[in-house]
Image: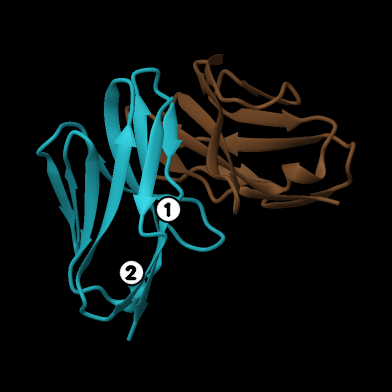
Chain colours: A cyan, B brown
Amino acid sequence: EDQVTQSPEALRLQEGESSSLNCSYTVSGLRGLFWYRQDPGKGPEFLFTLYSAGEEKEKERLKATLTKKESFLHITAPKPEDSATYLCAVQANDYKLSFGAGTTVTVRA
Amino acid sequence: KAGVTQTPRYLIKTRGQQVTLSCSPISGHRSVSWYQQTPGQGLQFLFEYFSETQRNKGNFPGRFSGRQFSNSRSEMNVSTLELGDSALYLCASSISHEQYFGPGTRLTVT
C-alpha cells in the first residue's frame, strides 16, 4: 500500500527564518509527487509536480526537491502570508493520489 | 478560466438520510476525483471518474457512490448517513497529472 509521511506536523517560524518540510514516501510505481497548499476552510491549491529524482521546482519563496525516497519543500525567508498547511501527495501508476497528513506552517511577523 | 465549483458549500443532514453533492470541473478536464477530508484521517481518496467511467475506487463502503455525466460534471451520493460521515468533501479535476481542487462541501451529520 502506498504511504506518505510528512514531518514535522507543525512548524512555527519567525518571518525571514528559512526552513524545510519533509515528505517521505513508498509507492508502487511513482507517476508523480505533488505539493499543495491548503488554507483553513478551502480546498488544496496546487503548487508543484515532481516526476523524477533530482528534479527541482521553484515558485517565489518555495522550492521543491525530489529523491527516490523523499521530497523536501524549502521555504526561504517566509512571510506571514506563507502560513498554511502544506500537503504532499504521490500518484501511483493506477493514478490514485495518496496524501500525507500535512505540515501546518505558522509564520510570525 | 473558471476553477472547480462545488455545490452546495455547506450541508446539514440527519443520520440515516442520504445526500448528493455536485462538482463542475474546469472546462476541458475529463477526470474528476472525490476526496473526504477529516481532522483525524486527513485527505482520503473516494473515487475517480474519467469519461463517465469509474477508473479508480478507494476503500470506502458501498454507501458512497458517484457518477459522471457526458459534460464531465460529477455527483457523489452518500446513503444512510452516519455521524462519522461529517467531513469536508473535495472534488478535483485534472487534464493530465495535476489535480485542481474545488472549495469543498462541508457536510455535517447530526
Q: Nearer the viewer, residue A63 or B21?
A: A63
Q: Position of residue A24 (x, y in %)?
A: 30, 42
- Indicate the secondary structure of the residue bearing disc 1: loop
Looking at marks 2 and 1 on the same chain, the residue that comes earlier in the sequence is marked by 2
Q: Nearer the viewer, residue A26 or B55?
A: A26
Label placed on residue A82: 2
Q: Residue at x 75, y 32 (%)?
A: B78
Q: Residue at x 46, y 25 (%)?
A: B31
- Indicate the secondary structure of the residue bearing disc 2: helix
Q: Which residue is mark 1?
A: A102
Q: Residue at x 71, y 24 (%)?
A: B61
Q: Is residue B8 left or right of residue A21?
A: right
* A16 up-or-down from B10: above or below: below
Q: Residue at x 35, y 29 (%)?
A: A91
Q: Position of residue B43 (x, y in %)?
A: 52, 43
User: Marks 2 and 1, Cα distance to the nearest angstrom?
Assistant: 14 Å
Q: Is residue B103 left or right of residue B94?
A: right
Q: Residue furthest left?
A: A54
Q: Position of residue B30 (x, y in %)?
A: 45, 24
- Few, some or many residues within 10 Å of mark 1 (<14, 14–19, 20+): many
